Amino acid sequence: MSYISEKRKEELLRRYGSKKESNANIIGRPGLPKGPGSKGPGGPRGSIGGGKPKNAYATINRLLAYIGRDKVKILFVFSCVLVSSLASLAGSYVLRPIINNLVAADRTAEEKINNLVVGILIMACIYMIGVLCSYLQQRIMIGVSQKALIKIREDLFGKIQKLPVKYHDTHTHGDVMSRFTNDLDSVGEMLNNTMSQIFSGVLTLIGTITLMFVTNWILALVTIVTVPLLVYAGGMIGKQSRKYFIGQQQALGAVNGYIEETVTGQKVIKVFCHEETAMGEFEFLSDDLRNKQMKAQFFGGIMGPVMGNLSQISYALSATIGGILCLTKNFDIGGLTIFTNYSRQFSRPISELSMQMNTIFSALAGAERVFEVMDEAPETSDQEDAIEICAEGNRVEGAQLIKGEVTLKNVTFGYVPGKTVLKNINVKAKPGQKIAFVGSTGAGKTTITNLINRFYEIEEGEILIDGINIKNIKKDSLRRNIAMVLQDTHLFSGTVRENIRYGRPDATDEEVITAAKIACAHSFIERLPQGYDTVLEGDGANLSQGERQLLNIARAAISKAPILILDEATSSVDTRTEKHIERGMDQLMKNRTTFVIAHRLSTVRNADQIIVLEHGEIIEQGTHDELIKMGGRYYQLYTGAIELD
Ligand SMILES: Nc1ncnc2c1ncn2[C@@H]1O[C@H](COP(=O)(O)OP(=O)(O)OP(=O)(O)O)[C@@H](O)[C@H]1O
């Protein structure tokens, strides 16, 4: 194992442990072992931070609202829990007359056997009813909780679709994913088992104590003395196991986060020969997980034995005092037998409830994280009088026809308050014109395009399309009229044809091919094994970066939007291909108002206007020839006197 400094160790734990909570879900997550008699699938599996929920009461109410949609079924489930808990208590209670009958001196052997058979049959019936109710309760509850969970998942997914781009820009994918996986999992586990287990536990506890008092109040008082001890021990062990369980989940998150990063970064690791370092760091994180896991599993595992042993104290006490009462106070043997049974049983619900606290806490914390997303402000909704727009080639009834003139008037914008990214931007693009933005990295080029399609709202200035403020246009309609080719090429799982058609779902097969031809993608698609029907895997991993980009261009080409935004659209195709698709691009841009962002200045030479941005401000503006004549920044960039940095 290669040497890892203490500082790096701390860094690994901090960085990966808190980074991607979702990662805890990549590889199986061990839960705590089952509590004694627990019906659940193990300990809590909440989110890593699964500490205490912040507002448990409100969260429970919201969860109940989801579950409460099936009121009748819930009522039935609780009735079943009630009957099965009573059956388990009554089953033991029947033992009393059976034993008393067996030890009675005034009965014949035949009478004893008859009574025994009847007693056993009654007992069997009671237990059968209990088993049936447990089965029904389990089946129905799973149905109800799964339905509630699906609804929560749908609501969450629906909300994600409505969140503004800003939300996705400020939250890691891992964080969003973890709400769908870890957090919803732990909520599901609680809904599946915990609710009915708590109810059954409380009922069994109350029932056992009541029957103990009914059987013999003196013995009951003796047994009750041990309750505080049981509650204290259960609480203490539960607290410890909760603490170590969170540590275990964090360590697991760290291991999985490290795996994810090294698997996705395999090429870079190989290029820089970091294999051994990666192995060493992984072993360190793995060891840390093992240590924390051992503690978590230990505390999870000792709950049952400790509670069991403590309940032996009350068992021994009640057996001794009960024996004395039998001899001196006419206490019946049957009564003593069932009492000792109850005193043995009675620690079970307490330890079960203590174990459930882990699941409940992590599930409520998970539910809170889910509801947190649901409560996020959605994208600003359209104004009531917002209008629809359409272009000549794609007329929509009732929509205002636009030609595609785009005007930015005194636009000032910042992503975060106090940090201005764009300062007083004024641009006027006439219909069909090509406007190019050039400038160094971080100058604000992409930001301008983010504002035109309202990914972000501007505070100062206005953006107009054919004189209409974009705030007065329905967002859907606005975006339908702006086609974009983004820097990051994203393709969906599906065929090449489906991916191109994403730009306009009602496009015909011929239109798909025409669009591909415009983007110069047709010839490479033809060479694919199934041509247009080739299925793309994992974001188009079976294509080259340039080919992916050509599909993105085809997707924009198929749309009939009058405004086009090309953000580094040809950056990932080689110069030869770029030359090749130039003609296609010209055709794509024909009759469309186009905004081009390009690092290669040769591609923007023929633009109607070139806008040079520096630190969010326009420093030069004009045609290529004008700017060259001016001999300023653009001239320097173009002649290579300075480079874009
Ligand atoms: N979502 C965001 N939140 C906060 N700041 C951002 C965000 N996106 C961009 N920025 C900042 O805004 C500034 C302009 O970014 P922008 O992406 O517009 O630059 P660009 O000119 O397109 O750069 P490049 O040529 O590298 O793509 C940068 O300083 C960047 O750090």
Image (cartoon, helix red, strand yellow):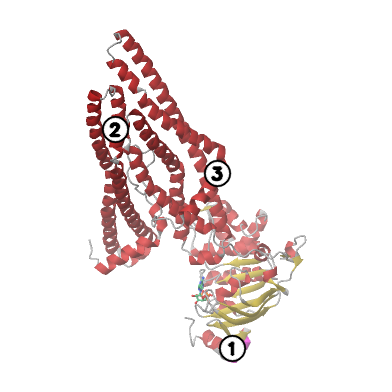
Disc 1 or disc 2, which is closer to the eye? 2
Q: Tell me if 43 is positioned left or right of 175 in this view.
A: left
Secondary element under disc 3, as helix, strand or loop, is helix
In this rendering, the answer to whether 416 lies above or below 507 is below
User: What kind of element bears circle 2?
Assistant: helix
- Residue 219 visible in the picture: yes
Q: Crowdedness of circle 1 by 10 Å Cα count: few (<14), some, many (20+)?
A: some
> Which mark is in front, 2 or 3?
2
Report helix, strand or loop for mark 1: helix
Q: Mark 2 to mark 3: distance in Å?
A: 42 Å
Counting residues from the start of the chain, the first of labels 2 and 3 encountered is 3
Q: Is residue 601 magenta?
A: no
How dense is the environment of label 3, judged by Cα within 10 Å: few (below 14), some, or many (20 and up)?
some
CA distance for labels 1 and 2: 103 Å
Quarter-of-image position of residue 616: bottom right
Using the rendered view, name the quadrant where residue 321 is placed: top left
The amino acid type, in three-letter code, at marker 3 is Gly
Residue 219 got which mark? 2
The magenta region covers 625-630
Q: Position of residue 476 (x, y in %)?
A: 66, 62
What is the three-letter code of the residue carrying label 1? Ile
Marks 1 and 2, the one that precedes in the sequence:
2
Q: Identify the residue under disc 3.
A: 68
List x then y, in percent, for residue 240: 30, 52
Residue for badge 1: 628
Screen quadrant of the N terminus: bottom left
Residue appearing at x 36%, y 29% in the figure: 214
Q: Nearer the viewer, residue 587 or 471?
A: 471
> What amino acid does circle 2 point to?
Leu
Mark 1 in CB contact with mark 3 (< 8 angstroms): no
